[in-house]
Amino acid sequence: MIKTAETVWAACLEFIKDNITPVGFKTWFEPIVPVKLEGGALTIQVPSKFFFEFLEENYVKILRSALVRELGKEARLLYDVRLENSYSSKVPQTVKIPSSNRAPMQPQNVNFPSKNISREVKNPFVIPGLQKVKVESNLNPNYCFENFMEGESNRLGRSAGMAVANKPGGTSFNPLMIYGGVGLGKTHLAHAIGVQVKDKYPDKTVLYVSTEKFIQQYGDAVLKNNNRNDFLHFYQMIDVLIVDDIQFLSGKTKTQDAFFQIFNELHQNGKQVILTSDKAPVDMQDIEQRLLSRFKWGLSAELQAPDYETRINILKNRLYRDGVEVPEEVIEFIAKHIKTNVRELEGVVTSLIAQSAFNKKEFSLTLAKGIVDKFVKNTKKEVSVDYIQKVVSKYFEIDLATLQSKTRKRHIVQARQLAMYFSKKLTKSSLASIGSQIGKRDHATVLHACKTVDNLTATDKQFKKYVDDISKKLSF
């Protein structure tokens, strides 16, 4: 018997009807219309975007099970979603959206060895007293390998990430350090590894945490709750620990010590550590050498700006996931003009879809050009302490070594103070990190420099001109 969309969907409905409540079946499955069966992909039409989102959030598992029974393991589900605000009232407009086949990440139970702990361990991710030790992974299931487009710019990182995800703690890539500039996909790749681990090894405890959150939790554990040991024990029980923006540990000596102990315990017990950073370990400032040496134990993989072909693939994948069809010439125009990072590409696509929907305009080169021009104009490049030093040195016609030297000549001291001032103003680096990078000064020197610049700007016209000129040079 030849299978059709109607016969396959009818068989799926029989299975689904036996596994959910009658009300749920009548509300969410009877209105669905089978549209097309092509290979292993079944397309169904649903009445609205809300309807699609509800199915994906609540019934994706049973839909997947039903399809696999009828079409095999390679089965895929596509939605034709009717848009509530169609441009034409005669023919309802629809968009095609693929099913994610993913359910939200579930809380993870963790067994803690009683021999090491005399009382219940506090979970730093929840308010005390409201929940026992259940670990939310903090993973975003939408950040997966399927929508992380591979190219020359990220092939090493993606391949290493796949290897780690398939055998966490069992490869030589431990820790796996993913580094690169802003918006190149570091966080996406880190989440994708965690999501893949949870898919393949549901019993493993995976935890994603930003370094800023980790620092805050450590401060609360020590200063407010006096339970530093509980904090360490909690993190030492994790199977796969993902820490984002590890460079923010710069200058945080006590937090670095805590992370050092956690890292050693995890590594010695074959647990996986994944780190992201905006720079390579060798370029990190104010991180203890013993910690930096451990960062170098595994693999450091750099993510670079995507090439043209990769940018095209990223755009097409994003548009496919959003169920939007855009002319090839528009996609090529965006890819040619947005070159810096993935985040900017996605931002342009979001603006393009919004402008088209709200203003009822067709996707065109004219529309794309207007969005790209505004986007590029309003996008400011992030500056580093190194870059600021180079700009200031060039402005005062001195070399970098002289700027960082210990000379007390007035014009060099003022140049150095301006470099410190703009570093504090325009970067996320700590005072200690800024001082360390500008001639190995301490944080007090940087603070004094910033106050001096503020005072001189208010009282000295020539000095104010220095500030204004350099400020313009650092504006993008």
Image (tube, helix red, strand yellow):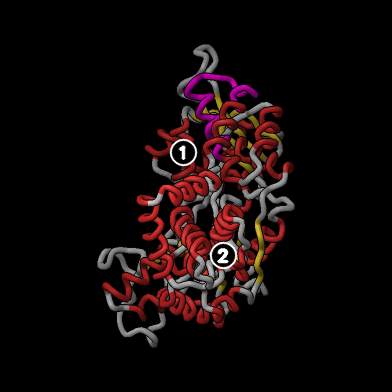
Q: Vertical placement of 105 versus 125: above or below?
A: above
Within-10-Å neighbours for mark 2: few <14, some 14–19, many 20+: many
Q: Mark 1 points at which residue?
A: 53
Q: Vertical placement of 202 versus 8: above or below?
A: below
- In front here: 277 or 14? 277
Residue 435 placement (x, y as % from top left): 48, 68
Question: Mark 1 is on which residue type?
Answer: Glu
The residue at 42%/67% (across/down) is 214
The answer to if 363 sits in the magenta stretch is yes
Q: Which residue lies furthest to the bottom in this view?
A: 115
Whichever of callouts 2 and 1 sits on the residue coming sooner in the sequence is 1
The residue at 39%/88% (across/down) is 115
- In front here: 322 or 291? 291
Within-10-Å neighbours for mark 1: few <14, some 14–19, many 20+: few
Q: Vertical placement of 224 versus 91: above or below?
A: below
Residue 157 placement (x, y as % from top left): 67, 60
- Name the chief secondary structure element in magenta: helix
Whether residue 312 sits left or right of residue 90 in the image: it is right
SS label for mark 1:
helix
Mark sitting on residue 403: 2
The answer to if 399 sits in the magenta stretch is no
Whether residue 73 sits left or right of residue 383 in the image: it is right
Give the alpha-carbon distance from disc 2 to disc 1, as whole Å. 57 Å
Residue 382 placement (x, y as % from top left): 54, 50
Range of the magenta residues?
347-368
SS label for mark 2:
helix
